[in-house]
Image: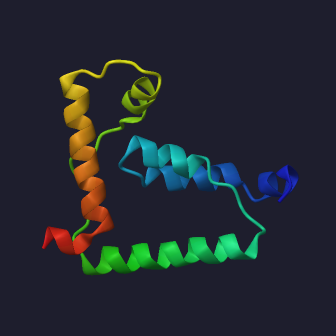
Amino acid sequence: MDSKTLHVLEYEKILARLASFCDFSASADLARGLQPSNHFDEVTRLLAETTEARFLLSTHDLTIGGSHDIRASADLAARGGVIDPQQLLEIKTTLIACRDLKNPSHML
């Protein structure tokens, strides 16, 4: 989709509104970075993910509780930096939250 069409549709406002519903900084960043696609397979996959997420949200008490924005820590580690114990604890709790989201039956 060209930039003029996105401007007419006020796409930036739509993304800003979507990001306002996000409780997690990384999620808000991802929401603001969404771009429309004209690839049928990609759109079909994304719609299937949305359908699955809506189903899980309606049938399970899902949360991202305990999650932290660990992007800076991961970047530091990838560059060979030293991560302090607090950062390691934040990584651990974030990974546990990710595991619980991936496998909701684990929380029961």
Q: In front: 84, or 66?
A: 84
The quarter of the picture where the N terminus appears is: bottom right
Note whether 84 is above or below 10 in the view shown. above
* Image label count: 0
Note whether 72 is above or below 61 in the view shown. above
Note whether 67 is above or below 46 in the view shown. above
Residue for point 30% across, 40% down: 68
* Residue 40 visible in the displayed image: yes
Residue for point 21% across, 70% down: 61
In the rendered structure, the answer to whether residue 42 lies left or right of residue 65 reads right
Locate residue 20, reporting x and y percent: 46, 50
Residue for point 31% across, 79% down: 58
Q: How is the image coloured?
A: rainbow
Instruction: Return the residue found at the far front.
Output: 80
In the rendered structure, the answer to whether residue 25 lies left or right of residue 59 reads right
In the rendered structure, the answer to whether residue 40 lies left or right of residue 48 reads right
Locate residue 108, reporting x and y percent: 12, 73
Locate residue 71, reporting x and y percent: 42, 34
Instruction: Return the residue found at the far left.
Output: 108
Q: Quadrant of residue 60?
A: bottom left
* Residue 64 visible in the displayed image: no
Locate residue 39, reporting x and y percent: 76, 70
Q: In front: 10, or 81?
A: 81
Residue for point 25% across, 54% down: 97
